[in-house]
Image: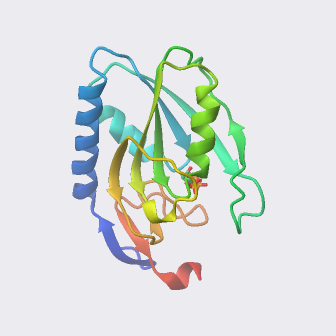
Amino acid sequence: MHKDVERIFASEEEIAAVVRKLGAEITRDYAGKTPVFVGILKGCFIFMADLIRASQVPCTLDFMSVSSYGDGAVSTGAVKIEKDLSVNIEGRDVIIVEDILDSGNTLNYLVKYMGERKPASIRIVTLMDKPERRAVPITADYVGFSIPDAFVVGYGLDYQQRYRNLPYIGILKPEIYS
Ligand code: PRP
C-alpha cells in the first residue's frame, strides 16, 4: 500500500466486480442501441477503459474536459469547458462517464449542456457517489460505490494530480491534504 494511503477503500478485485455489474446493467439497458460514452477527463479514464470492455454493446466514445471557475477554494458551480465534444450527439443515446459525483455542479452543467444538443437520451454512470456532499439535486443512473465524505485517490482519481495510477481506491491520510 502507498505510504500516503490510510486504508484501501476498494481493492482491484472489488473494483473489477463493481465494473462488471455496471457493464452488465448497461448491456441489458442498451440492447439494440449504440450509445456514445462521453468520459469527463481526467479522472474517468481508467474506469471508462474498463467499463466499455465490460459493456457488451456496440458503442462509440468521446471525451470532454471541464474545470470549475474560480480559485478552487469554494466551488461557484460555474464550469469552464477545456475540451468540448468532438462528435455530434444529436439523436444519440449518451452515457456520461464520471469517476466521482460530489457537489453535482459539474454534472448539473454537463447534462444541461449536452441536453441542448438534442440527444435521444442522457444517462450518467459514476464509479463513486458522495450523496451527502450534494449541492444541486442530481442523481446518477448507475453508481458503483456510494461512499462517505472521505478523500479518495487511485484508479484515476487524484490529489494535486498524483496517485491516479494506484490500482486500488485508497483513502488518503488527512495529513497529506490538511
Ligand atoms: C472531479 C470529478 C468530477 C467533479 C465532481 O473532477 O471527475 O468531474 O470533480 O465534482 P462535483 O460533483 O463537485 O462537480 P476534478 O475537477 O477533480 O478533475 P479531474 O477529473 O481532472 O481529476
Single out the residue that lies furthest toward the right. 70
Q: Quadrant of the C terminus?
A: bottom right
Farthest residue, direction front: 137
Image point (59%, 17%), residue name: 88
Which color scheme did the rendering employ for the protein?
rainbow
Q: Is residue 55 visible?
A: no
In which quadrant will I find the N terminus?
bottom left
- How far across and down, in percent of the image, does residue 81 sit? 71, 40
User: Which quadrant would residue 172 be assigned to in this image?
Assistant: bottom left
Number of numbered discs overlaid on the protein picture: 0
Query: Which residue reaches farthest bottom?
Result: 175
- Determine whether, in the image, residue 69 is placed left or right of residue 166: right
Can the viewer see residue 96 in this picture? yes
Query: Quadrant location of residue 149?
Result: bottom left
How far from the left and from the top, in percent, is residue 140?
A: 42, 44
Q: Nearer the viewer, residue 111 or 26?
A: 111
103 vs 148: above or below: above
Taking 119 as reference, is 126 above or below it?
below
Residue plotted at (41% across, 61% down): 166
Between 50 and 96, the residue placed more toward the observer is 96
Is 84 displayed left or right of 57 in the figure?
right
* Residue 24 percent across, percent down from the top left: 23, 35
**What residue sits 55% from the left and 64% below the top?**
162
Whole-percent x, y for residue 45 in the image:
47, 44
